[in-house]
Amino acid sequence: MAKKPKAATFIKDPLWYKDAVIYQVHVKSFFDSNNDGIGDFPGLIAKLDYIADLGVNTIWLLPFYPSPRRDDGYDIAEYRGVHSDYGTMADAKRFISEAHKRGLRVITELVINHTS
């Protein structure tokens, strides 16, 4: 397997997407850390080594924002928050930090046509 780049260098590459190997993750269904039946950021953090071992270099998070969830989370109510079922903003920031330590980029999607 290719050696993972250090966080300080891989963030600066403007052409990173050309060689991206992307793993798409829906937080709510990936790994549940507290046995409430819903995946969460602490669960994702617990499985980051597994994800990194798959050989991917980018994690694409599906919507994790506060939402009434009538449209699988795409009906976002607050773009600057984290749905309470998935953890806290601190959990999300820790997930990103831990992913970067493993040489993994984190992207999320913004579906403008679901915005009002």
Image (cartoon, rainbow, N blue to C red):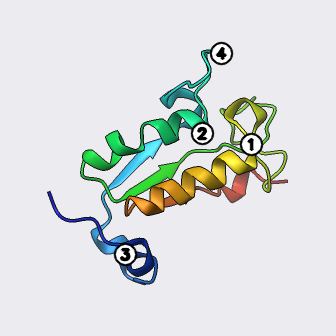
- The residue that mark 1 highlights is 88
- Three-letter code, disc 3: Trp
Label 4 with label 2: CB-CB less than 8 Å: no
Mark 2 Cα shell of 10 Å, populated few (<14), some (14-19), many (≥20):
many
Q: In the figure, residue 93 lies in which quadrant?
A: bottom right
Mark 1 Cα shell of 10 Å, populated few (<14), some (14-19), many (≥20):
some
The vertical placement of 75 against 14, above or below, is: above
Secondary structure type for disc 1:
loop
- The residue that mark 3 highlights is 16
**Front residue of 83 and 1:** 1
Pointer 4 or 2: first along the chain:
4
Q: Nearer the viewer, mark 3 or mark 1?
A: 1
Left or right side of 72 for 27: left
Mark 3 Cα shell of 10 Å, populated few (<14), some (14-19), many (≥20):
some
- The residue that mark 4 highlights is 36
Which image quarter is the N terminus in?
bottom left
- The residue that mark 2 highlights is 41
Pointer 2 or 1: first along the chain:
2
Q: Measure how far apart labels 4 and 3 are at the Cα level.
A: 36 Å
